[in-house]
Amino acid sequence: MYPFLEALVAALILIGAFFLLVGALGLARLPDMMRRLHGPTKATTLGIGALLIASMVYFAAVRGSFSIHELLITLFLFLTAPVSAHMLAKAHILRARAERDRLPATGTATGWATLDSGHPKGE
Amino acid sequence: MTLLFVILIPLLGALIPPLVIRSGRNACAAATGSVTLLALALLMSHAPAVFSGEVPKAGVEWVPALGLSLSVFADGLGFFFAAMILAIGLLVIVYARFYLSREEPMGRFFAYLLLFQGAMVGVVLSDNIIALLVFWELTSLTSFLLIGFWTKRADARQGARMALVVTGGGGLALIAGLLLVAQAAGSYQLTEILVRGEMVRASPLYLPALLLVLVGAFTKSAQFPFHFWLPHAMAAPTPVSAYLHSATMVKAGVFLLARLWPVLAGTDPWFLIVAPVGLATMLLGAVIALFKDDLKAVLAYSTVSHLGLMTMLLGFGTPMAAVAAVFHIINHATFKAALFMVTGTLALLASASMAGVPLFNGFLSKEMMLEEAAHTAYLGLDFLFPVLASVAAVFSVAYSARFAIGTFLGPVRHDYPHHPHDPPLGLWLPVAVLVVPVIAIGLFPAAVAGPLVALTASAVIGGPLPDYHLALWHGLTPALFMSLLAFAGGAALILAFRRVDGVRARLPPLDAKAMFEAASGGLVVACRRIVAALHDGALSRYMGVTVATLVAVGGYGFWSATHAAGARPLLPVTAPALTAFLALVLASGAVLLFHGERLTALILTGVVGVVVALAFLQFSAPDLALTQISVDVVTTILMLLALNLLPKTTPREGSRAVRWRDGAIAGLAGLGAAGLAYAVMTRNGTSISDFYLAQSKPGGGGTNVVNVILVDFRGYDTFAEIIVLGIAALAIYALLDPALKGAAVRRIKAMLPRDEAKDAHPLILVVATRVLLPLSLVVGAYIFLRGHNAPGGGFIAGLVVAIALIMQYIASGYGWAAERMKLDAQSLIGAGVAIAGLTGLAAFAFGRPFLTSTFGYLHWPLVGEFELASAMAFDLGVFLTVVGVMVLSLAQLSRVAHRVDPSPESRAPMDVPLEGAASGAAGKED
Amino acid sequence: MIAAAIAIAGGAICLAIALTLYRLAVGPDATDRVLALDTLVIETIALIVLGGIAYGTAMYFEAALLFAMVGFVTTVAFCKFLLRGNVIE
């Protein structure tokens, strides 16, 4: 195995672990839900991405075989992470009354989807 | 073998009448009659052999090791009864053709009748006692259908139910009794048991066996104190009554007493129980019959009385009395059947026979009965039986006379709703056929009935026949004087009937039906109380009892064994293992703290699921891990769906003491399970896994042992399991369908959150899941295909695909997703079970047992070496079933919630109208 | 070099899991707990991938794949429940 690849894998693993830790730290330490949401959705996703690339490189170099598993996992995670975050944010907006009051106006006739059906009242 | 067909032809022939009824009522009756006639002809083909003393046998073995077989034999008794059942059955069919009105479902009637006939013939011809018991219960069930044939009439339903409860209940006692007899005799074959009478009577099981058998026989034959059901069974159509009361059903009990006479009779307990019960029944039936004004009721109680007579004779235990009993069975069958189908002068003759008038057959057997009663002493009381038997005879004469006078000789009435007319040929011909033997036997007993009585009686006695003469004139015997006395007394009773009836009217009335209803009602209430006390609906209680039992049994096992430490070294503790362990402990502990908030508890169990899956991975069980991961999410969705319909917090548990008690039980069980797991894991044991590991590739053609076990080694289990799974899903579907109407809906509506998001299907989620669907399906297909050799397989793939589909339901709503599911879940389940079953059956084509698997290797271009196993088709069945089950049950649960709170279906991808499209979409929906 | 990186990374991920569990225990709202569960699943995937590199086997990747798919469905189902009360409608 080339030392360069080895170093690359090791670096990617460490980067991945670092961002995972950062994400978890954010989740644990940040003061409110909207801010906490940033940690897992951004840092953690980045971290797991780095780890998956490390795994891909490692298996390509060691086994000489390219595996699509990591690619699939990456695809899944990168596609789903924003949606999960979006849904969680919606749930939080609905449940936290203080959050609702802080929402800016949408600037259109229709309000925020979570709170306003967009249909005239009484339908 | 033809003997077996005597039973099977009526049973299978029961399919014919409902089909033939389309061709008309005559065709239907003719078809039914020819079924019976065919059975009778087959039986009669054995007549020469039977009369020459042989005993024809036939049978098929089922489980010889357990003594189970369908075997029949026709000795004199069985042959006689079978002939009587079929012959009178034939007459009843003719009569019923003309009796039933055009509106009544004749096909159904004849189907029931043939089923009943087959069951009766089965009872009298069975050699194996298990088969006999099955047929016995079958007669109870089919007679229930016949008695309750007029389902619109309350008395018919009640009478049928009463008959079923009494005779079916007696049947249960009979099962126990006959099994004890078989135990004592060491055989399940009646032919064997009959020659081992000494052995049975000497056995300590004799008395309990006797008592149980007698309960069975007495209930069936309406003996005191079980006589009350029979008159209420009169709510049946008349042909049924004629059949049930003359030749079948109630005779089954007498038949059984006669059948087992060589085995059970001749002892003190037999005489002390059977004879007085018969006497009491005879007397009671005769007395009640006199005071009944309804024709059918008179006949019903007279049947009770005559059954008592036969029972009493069999109870005497002497060969002579047994001969008399057999003779009376023949005579009673003829005159009673005729009386039920009563028409004109012919019935006069029959009632004369019932009264025991000389020159009719009833006289002869009654004479013999009185003769036997005359010299029977009961517990040192010389006069008890003679006197009471004479009294019964007096009443018997009286009610017969009243029946005849009241019906046919009384004043002519003109207030009928319809003008009476002469009945058609079909109604009086069967009666005429029956009256012929009534007179023929009465005049020439020895010539007409002699051989039959000898044949049957010798089969009952099982030894040499006593010296007897069937004759009109026996000289000046005590029986003759008793007979004369009976006639004189009967005449006196009739003359003084008004006065006697006045006395009876002043006595407190005893209504057996009301007593039965009260008793059964009380029983139901008592059962409800017991059940309600044991099952109070508290899950914690059931869990507590179950777990406490487990702790007790496990504790006993632990203390009664050795406790050496395991020899296997422990694994080192790594950081991930420790973290996972801590996560597990913390999450489990937190569930305990937060279990009041159901949603929080559910989130915490999600953590437990993740850790368990990790543990499976750590200990080289990737299949289990995959299953655990996918089952976990399905469970979560299921719980969330259910939680929507439930209160969000648990109610307060019981007192502190109760909670401590429950906690102690749960803690002990948990410690026990942990200790057990520890003990197993620290030991090196051999298990069946080694065999599976070694045989997986050579035997099943796959390297994934788990999958090979599922689809091959234990394919039977899997097959049964997917069937159960399918049934469970269909049950969920059926149970939930009507579950939420009325009060339940209102209750759930009150629990729904008031504050909810306005968009049911957020746009981003909808789009993302649609992109994910093909990806997930690819994952499912991949896991399915590699299953035989690498972790995966039909079950996990089914779960994955089901999750992918449910994801669409969650994101886009039930309406949208269901509309696009081209295959409904029920068809998926059906197809899955069918494919798995057919794969199993395919093995038969190669002469191999069910579910034998085979495999081969194909070379596919581009893909390379590819293995094709028949197990894969089986796995496909599993896959389809799992997908269908998951989608069906979850979707149905969601539909329930949907019905509670219907939200408007939207066609657009998003509920909140987008800019520009808003006005258009809103306009369209209006 | 890789082995050392794996050891350090393993420790870091374990620490991350511990922090996530803390959030899960503290809450305060259900949304926080769901977020923590979602994060926990991703960290588990990381652990599995790391284990795959450490043991040099691709055996566990299906589990990671399934976790990725299933973790999303779980989170969405919980959110749907919090938002609408009904998961499938």
Image: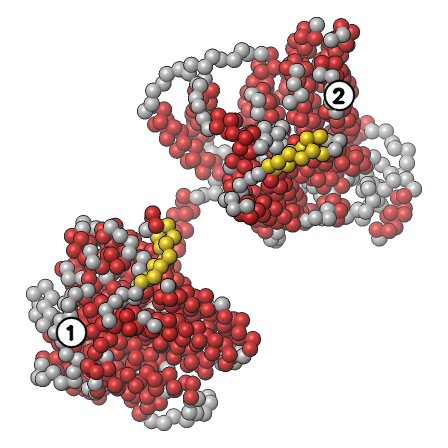
Q: Which mark is residue B762?
A: none
Chain of the residue on which disc 1 is drawn: B
Q: Quadrant of residue B221?
A: bottom left
Say which of B835 and B209 sits in front: B835
Q: Is residue B276 left or right of residue B119?
A: left
Q: Which mark is residue A66?
A: 2
Residue B408 position, x and y percent, is 33, 90
- Tag 2: amino acid: Phe
- The quarter of the rendered structure image containing the N terminus of chain B is bottom left
Q: Quadrant of residue A50?
A: top right
Say which of B8 and C11 sits in front: B8
The vertical placement of B389 against A64, above or below, is below
Using a 10 Å C-alpha cutoff, classify the residue at mark 1 as few (fewer than 14 neighbours), some (14 to 19) or many (20 or more): some
**In the rendered image, which residue does mark 1 sit on?**
B388
Residue B225 appearing in the image: no
Q: Is residue C85 left or right of residue B763?
A: left
Element at label 1: helix
